[in-house]
Image: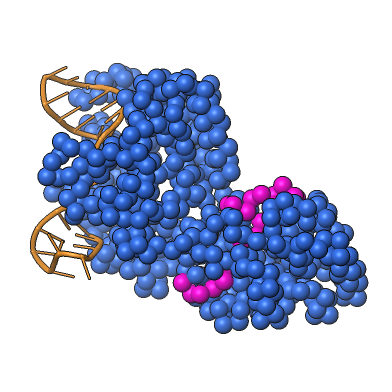
Chain colours: A blue, B orange
DNA sequence: GCCGTTTTCGGCCCGACTGTTTTCAGTCG
């Protein structure tokens, strides 16, 4: 059972309690919805946690829901859930998948029209709306009847199912809108916020904050955006639009003197904000996007023009957006013990570069020469770089031929070193780990290298146990120092394989091997949540771009974002180290 | 139902916006 299925079930429990008796079950509803959200966003599989008896690791999942989930994974159903849902019409649930439908509205329709078939309920509601029967219902009207028809149509078109955007795509989209908004003379400052500012690996909606003393004019300008599909809502301080391509854009406005609290509010995450507000309540302070009110004098609003002042007023150190996920950052901020997260400017080199050197590789080659990549590295102020083309293909070459190719390449790299004294060049390779765990080229050839990255490029469908054995065997080779894109996932395309991380991390720590954070926006692998666990296990990491062209070397910042979201400091990231230290590490 | 440096009992974020309403309910983030 997948996380999203489990999340949906818990959410259905929340909806069921809402129908049965909202007042009575008020806090159960909140608890179930919270657990559902956490599981939907969790990067570990709940079914694995349940089997390994580790559900207590999930925040928001207490003893009761733990028991229910254990029962669910073991038997496929939960007696308690079935008992609760027995009195709730089944046809209600499909409607909840449609945005703008909540439990109350769905229940009203289902019960009033006596809709029983959960397979056809969406068509049934659509038919009733088309016949004009919904407008006649108490609490509904002509407008809401039209809204229902449109919501169903949009749901059917799959507009809501459009997959989440990669970070660069979302950034580009946001930049277009921001560029447009800058032409509005009433816009003072403007920033992308939400998950875009927190640099999540994928982005759902675009959130934008504007500081202005004329919110009405800013919002009027916003809803005239040329690529608008329709206005979802427009009020006095915020508006929401649907743009072509099915993306939602939310824009909020506050005057400059209160812009700090808007930045804080609109950056999220929701979990961070809820916790922050609960934390503040205990100090007698109530937070909102407008500022801070003291409970003893609710009329008085403290306003903040920047975020640092806002956090400071709560007795907290400013928290970097990347870690605002309510995973301990508020507690550490209070003690002023937040880690100093790694910065892009601290990166001293890129060790995963594919060039056009004729290595006759097993996989795709780079398009630019080694020299061009050296020039780009110099432009980026790097102290060193590493060439790591794919190994010469095993099937097309004898061991002797592979050796000869790499021998020539070594000579060529030596020449480059002669001509490029201002940067250190590390001779690497990206070597395949074959299904049996051996490396794709022979020891004599490997001995020509300073070290090699190793990675999986074939036969992904192995069990977790076998894949872990395979990786560990490959990584145990003396020359193998870095496991590249450790899970092989491609965002929105391929989930990748699973490994026994505890075992991998322990091995890396004891044998001085490193894991890569692959900065390519479609990989971002190792992902943020695993980065954090790796660091706690004292595993060292590299952030590499895996560039196949010079321009891609600019993508380093996406890898840095992942590292920051994983709470990495400079010391955790080996390619922030000076060359001499790094060189020693490679030989260790 | 969850959670804990004021608590194992007694709390539980805060507001925007819309539509159907003359003061609020529902949904969303």
Query: What is the tally of numbered marks visible in this picture?
Result: 0
- Asked if the stretch drawn in magenta spans residue A246, the answer is no
Q: Position of residue A370 (x, y in %)?
A: 82, 57
| Residue at 82 percent of width and 69 percent of height | A394
Which image quarter: residue A31?
bottom left
Q: Is residue A552 above or below residue A235?
A: below
Quarter the N terminus of chain A occupies: bottom left
In-image side of A402 versus A571 (left or right): right
> At 37% across and 48% down in the image, what residue appears?
A308
Q: Position of residue A389 (x, y in %)?
A: 78, 62
Residue A374 sits in quarter? bottom right
Residue A367 falls left or right of residue A248: right
Q: In front: A190, or A562?
A: A190
Q: Residue at x 67, y 78 (%)?
A: A584
Image: A138 above or below A263: above
Residue A333 visible to an observer of this rendering: yes
Q: Residue furthest front?
A: A422
Front-most of residues A286 and B15: A286
Residue at left offset 66%, top offset 72%: A582
A465 or A379, nearer to the observer: A379
**Can residue A74 be seen at all in this image of the molecule?**
no
In the picture, the quarter occupied by the C terminus of chain A is bottom right
Q: Is residue A372 above or below residue A250?
A: below
Q: Position of residue A162 (x, y in %)?
A: 51, 39
A276 left or right of A373? left
* Magenta-highlighted residues: A536-558
Point out residue A515 in the picture as x, y percentages from the top left corner. Answer: 60, 69
Please say whether residue A550 is one of the residues in the magenta stretch: yes
């Amino acid at each position: 059972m997948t996380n999203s299925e489990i999340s949906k079930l818990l959410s259905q429990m929340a909806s069921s309690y809402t129908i049965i008796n909202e007042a009575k079950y008020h806090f159960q509803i909140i608890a179930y919805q919270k657990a559902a959200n956490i599981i939907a966003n969790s990067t570990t599989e709940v079914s694995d946690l349940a089997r390994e008896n580790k559900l207590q690791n999930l925040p928001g999942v207490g003893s009761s829901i733990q028991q229910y989930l254990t029962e669910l994974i073991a038997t496929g159903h939960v007696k308690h859930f079935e008992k609760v849902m027995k009195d709730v019409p089944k046809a209600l649930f499909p409607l909840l998948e449609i945005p703008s439908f909540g439990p109350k509205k769905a229940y009203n329709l289902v019960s009033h029209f006596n809709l029983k078939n959960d397979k056809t309920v969406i068509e049934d509601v659509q038919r009733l709306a088309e016949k004009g029967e919904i407008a006649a219902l108490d609490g509904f009207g002509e407008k809401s009847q039209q809204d229902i028809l449109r919501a169903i149509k949009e749901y059917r078109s799959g507009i809501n199912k459009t997959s989440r955007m990669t970070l660069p795509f979302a950034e580009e989209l946001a930049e277009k809108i921001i560029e447009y908004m800058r032409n509005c003379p009433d816009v003072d400052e403007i920033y992308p916020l939400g998950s875009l500012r927190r640099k999540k690996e994928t982005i759902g909606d675009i959130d934008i904050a504007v500081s202005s003393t004329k919110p009405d004019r800013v919002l009027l300008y916003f809803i005239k955006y040329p690529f608008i599909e329709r206005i979802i809502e427009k009020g006095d301080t915020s508006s929401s639009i649907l743009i072509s391509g099915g993306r939602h854009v939310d824009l909020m406005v506050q005057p400059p003197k209160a812009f700090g609290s808007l930045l804080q509010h609109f950056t999220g995450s929701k979990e961070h904000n809820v916790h922050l507000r609960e934390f503040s309540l205990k100090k007698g302070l109530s937070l909102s996007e407008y500022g801070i009110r003291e409970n003893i004098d609710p009329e008085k609003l403290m306003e903040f023009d920047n975020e640092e002042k806002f956090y400071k007023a709560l007795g907290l150190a400013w928290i970097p957006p990347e870690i605002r996920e309510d995973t301990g950052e508020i507690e550490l901020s209070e003690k002023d013990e937040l880690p100093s997260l790694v910065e892009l400017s601290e990166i001293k080199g890129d060790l995963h570069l594919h060039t056009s050197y004729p290595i006759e590789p097993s996989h795709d080659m780079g398009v630019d020469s080694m020299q061009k990549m050296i020039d780009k590295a110099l432009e980026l102020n790097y102290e060193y770089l590493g060439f790591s083309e794919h190994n010469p293909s095993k099937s097309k070459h004898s061991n002797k031929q592979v050796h000869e190719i790499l021998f020539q390449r070594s000579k060529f790299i030596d020449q480059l070193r002669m001509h490029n004294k201002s940067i250190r060049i590390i001779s690497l390779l990206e070597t395949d780990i074959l299904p049996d765990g051996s490396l794709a080229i022979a020891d004599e050839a490997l001995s020509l290298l300073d070290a090699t990255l190793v990675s999986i490029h074939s036969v992904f469908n192995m069990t977790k146990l076998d894949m872990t054995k395979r990786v560990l065997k490959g990584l145990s080779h003396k020359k193998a120092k870095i496991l590249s894109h450790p899970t092989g996932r491609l965002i929105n395309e391929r989930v990748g394989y699973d490994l026994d991380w505890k075992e991998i991390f322990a091995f890396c720590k004891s044998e001085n091997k490193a894991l890569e954070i692959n900065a390519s926006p479609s990989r971002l692998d190792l992902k943020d949540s695993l980065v954090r666990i790796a660091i706690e296990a004292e595993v060292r990491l590299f952030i590499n771009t895996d560039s196949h062209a010079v321009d891609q070397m600019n993508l380093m910042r996406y890898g840095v974002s992942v590292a920051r979201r994983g709470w990495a400091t400079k010391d955790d990231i080996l390619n922030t180290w000076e060359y001499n230290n790094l060189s020693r590490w490679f030989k260790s």
